[in-house]
Image (cartoon, rainbow, N blue to C red):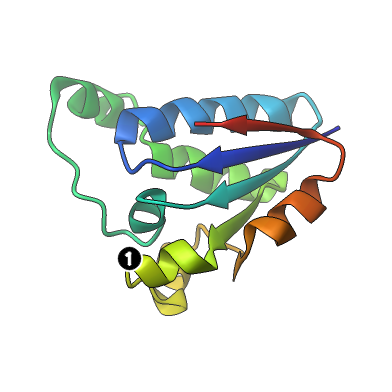
Amino acid sequence: MKVGVILTSDDPVKLYEAGTYIATELARGNEVVVFVTGRATLAFAGRAEVSETPEVKRMKELHVMWDELFSAARPMGVKVIACETASKIFAVGEEEYKKTGLVDVVSSMYTFLEEVGEGRVVVF
């Protein structure tokens, strides 16, 4: 089954929750396509401002930061599409995505929905 996940936030706890869900779906043998839009584009470009909250400190200690989860999911086949319009709104260039290595392509919601097809879509 194909699973589409839409990410809209740059909040590290919200991204951790999404990363855990995505890794679990991949482990279950499902194909996962992620659409990064809104402020999440800043996180995937490495520009999100992360406050050192107690939760973030603990996630770092446990090595479960969202970007670590996504890096680990890359070899499992997750495909990540960054929203071309949100990228323009937040002035994120493709070279920034390339530096983090977390985005496969910059494209549209239409492309994302075509990739997911009749699969389910989850929004975080």
The location of residue 6, given as percent across then percent down, is 57, 41
Front-most of residues 2 and 88: 88
Residue 85 vertical position relative to residue 73 in the rendered view, above or below: below
Above or below, 57 against 66 in this view is above
Relative vertical location of residue 31 with respect to residue 87 in this rendering, above or below: above
- The quadrant of the picture occupied by the N terminus is top right
> What residue lies at 33% left-to-right and 28% top-to-bottom?
13
Quick one: label 1, few (<14), some, or many (20+) residues within 10 Å? some
Does 30 sit left or right of 8 as displayed?
right
Say what amino acid the circle numbered 1 marks: Phe
- Label 1 secondary element: loop
The residue pinned by badge 1 equals 90
Quadrant position of residue 29: top right
Measured as percent of width and height from the top left, residue 107 is found at 62, 67
Measured from the top left, where is residue 22 in percent x and y? Answer: 61, 32
Q: Position of residue 121 (x, y in %)?
A: 69, 33
Residue 64 showing in the rendered view: no
Residue at (33% x, 24% y) in the render: 62
Whether residue 63 sits left or right of residue 35 in the image: it is left
Q: Is residue 86 left or right of residue 48?
A: right
Q: Is residue 122 visible?
A: yes
Image quarter for residue 57? top left
36 displayed left or right of 91: right
Q: Residue at x 87, y 38 (%)?
A: 118
Q: Residue at x 80, y 54 (%)?
A: 114
Q: How many marks?
A: 1
